[in-house]
Structure formats: structure tokens, C-alpha cells
Amino acid sequence: MSVKKNNRFFWIGFLVVLSLSLVFVESSGATVRAKDILAKVTKRYSSIDTLSARFTQVAVYQQLNRRNVSEGRVFLKGPVKDGTEEIPAKMRWEYEFPTKDVIVSDGVTLWMYQPDIMQVVETDASRGPLPVIMRLLTGFSGIEGTIGGELEDDFLIDIIRDGKESWRVSMAPTYGETSFSRLVVKINKNSFIVEGVKVVDPYGVETTVSLKDIKINPRLKNEIFRFDAPKGVTVVRP
């Protein structure tokens, strides 16, 4: 798999994020207190089981003076309780431009399919940074203990823009995260839905995913969160 495609898959898997966050708060100096924002966003997402949207992804490589744009659709299903166990969140990212790549996870297995080279990478969904990001940013079941402690203990959180229709909140990890150096999250003030996220990696690459045509609780069949490799496709299991 090429470096370019690895980077694309990592960030989309990472930004699955993006769509279903309910963990973003304002700094204590803002006009709205952090706990008030958190309570409202948490309450909003407590009624969300599934979500679908169209996405635009823009990756800016400043050192290379390069800008890549991708578009497609995303489908997500939040974690649910089954007795004392929790069924992990599921996702499906379908690229429509400029490639037809697909990323699917049933919460246990992650598939990254590249039809142009007839290859799918199949891996454990619990490996790497993705489980932390999924738990943190698609936390339908709440945020306490998402990565071992309170949110305020794990991130430096500050509002960087208080606009008319949305907040933009910056989150910088304090726990030695190596996958990203900062997140910037756009939260709609009326719906308390996350409409976009920018991820800045340690090398300064900025990847922004914006959502539109967001649909709350659409009917999604479990089958779309599984992947069966088409005939002739090479399956790679790292």
C-alpha cells in the first residue's frame, strides 16, 4: 500500500470521528461554561443511535505545498449496551471522489478496501489509535473514563472561536499522544451536533472533515458494517 493511501486511510479512520462527537466543551473563560456545553451535547447525543452524512475531506500538506480533496458518504452506529457488555461503535466511509475506497468497521474488525489495486487490509479494530478516537469522538455512552481519566485531565481545551452559529473548540492532548497534536471541533450552537473536525498531526499536516446533509437516526442495516471481499481481491492481514 502506498504512503499516500496509508495516510488517507489513517485519517479517515481517525476522523470517524468526526461525525459523532459528544465530548467538546468550552474553556472556563467563555460565556458558556464548559459543564453546560458538555451537558447539552451529551443530552443531544444520548438520543442518537445512528447518523449519516455527506463529507468533504481536505488534507493540507504545507511543507509540500499540496492540497488533496476527497468527498463521499459516512454512516455510523453508536455503541450500545448488551447487559454488562458494550457493543462497540460501527462505521462505514464510502469515498466517491477522487477514489472509490471504502472503510468499514463492525467494532471488532476494520477493513480498508482499495478497489483500484484490488486490495483490502483487514485488521483488529482495537489496534492503534482508532479505538481511543472512536471512544472519545463517538461516545454515545458518555465520556468519563474514555481514555483513563476525566476529559479535562487528558486535554487542554479552549474555545478559539465563538461564532454566531457555531463554536470552534481546540483540544490538545496532555497524555503523550503521538498520532495528533491538536483537534479543532466545530459544534452547531442550535443542534449541538458536531459539523466538522480539523486534525493537526505532529508534522503539521492539517486534515479537515466537514459534514453536511446530516441525518439523525436513519435506518441502517447491520450488513453495511461488514465487508466481504469481492472475488479476486487480495486480503492483507498485518
Image (cartoon, rainbow, N blue to C red):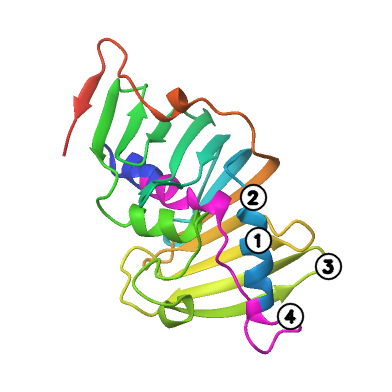
Question: Quick one: label 3 or label 1, which is nearer the N terminus?
Answer: 1
- SS at mark 4 in the image: loop
Image-based side of 17 in relation to 238, left or right: right
Q: Position of residue 171 (x, y in %)?
A: 51, 73
| C-alpha distance separating marks 1 and 4 | 16 Å
Q: Is label 1 in contact with label 4 (beta carbons under 8 Å)?
A: no
Q: Is label 3 in contact with label 1 (beta carbons under 8 Å)?
A: no
Q: Amino acid at mark 2?
A: Ser
Q: Residue furthest left?
A: 238
Disc number placed over residue 47 in the picture, else none: 2
Mark 4 or 2: in front is: 2
Q: Which residue is mark 4?
A: 32
The quadrant where residue 234 appears: top left
Q: Amino acid at mark 4?
A: Val
* Along the line of sight, the residue nearer the viewer: 164 or 91: 91
Question: Quick one: label 3 or label 4, which is nearer the N terminus?
Answer: 4
Magenta stretch, residue numbers? 10-35
* Along the line of sight, the residue nearer the viewer: 112 or 219: 219
The quadrant where residue 32 appears: bottom right
Q: Which residue is mark 3?
A: 164
Disc number placed over residue 43 in the picture, else none: 1
